Amino acid sequence: MWDFSAYLGLFVAAFGAATLLPMQSEAVLTSLLLAGKQSPALLLVVATVGNVLGSIINWLLGRYIEHFRHKRWFPVADDKLLRAQRAYHRYGRWSLLLSWAPIIGDPLTVIAGMLREPFWSFLLIVLVAKAGRYLALAALAFGVVG
């Protein structure tokens, strides 16, 4: 039962961290890796899947939030949105390789949806970025204890 709880907790943390919620999946993953009670490979898969699914939610949000852009309650000012869109156009879909990064990663995935980035290219690039981040984190964690 505890194993399932650990995996579920990691999934929730990773999923939430990829949305606009302030969660720290890295801390959860690192602590589980260092505890050594679960399969490291499965922990990496669970974290990656959760984080990528959260990014897909952001992409979907971006696809449909544009309909509300001119509402008074819209959370982003037009000038900031335009600046983000210009940056995305300048660097293109490859900017999604930074989707793992704090502060800029989550908005990038929303902007990708707003700018109609095709789902399959979005998914592939974000999967590489998120998996790469968690693999690097695991390598660091094992380097510290090993």
Image (cartoon, rainbow, N blue to C red):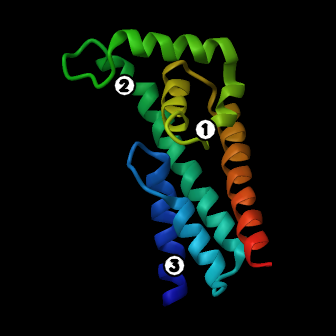
Q: For residue 109, which quarter of the picture?
A: top right
Q: At label 1, which amino acid type do we have?
A: Ser
Residue 80 horizontal side relative to residue 127, left or right:
left
Q: CA distance from mark 1 to mark 3?
A: 25 Å
At which x and y percent is residue 68?
A: 29, 19
Residue tagged 3: 6
- In the displayed structure, 98 sits above or below 28; it is above
Most foreground residue, 116 or 101: 101
Please state which of residues 63 and 71 is positioned toward the viewer in this rendering: 71
Nearest to viewer (mark 1 / mark 2): 1
Q: Pointer 2: residues within 10 angstroms few (<14), some, or many (20+)?
A: some
Q: Residues within 10 Å of mark 1 (few under 14, many from 20)?
A: many
Q: Which mark is residue 99?
A: 1
Inspect the image, locate mark 2, and give the three-letter code of the amino acid beneath it.
Ile
Q: Residue 65 shows which numbered tag? A: 2
Residue 98 in the image, given as x and y percentages of width and height: 65, 35
Left or right: residue 124 compared with residue 32: right
Of callouts 1 and 3, the N-terminal one: 3
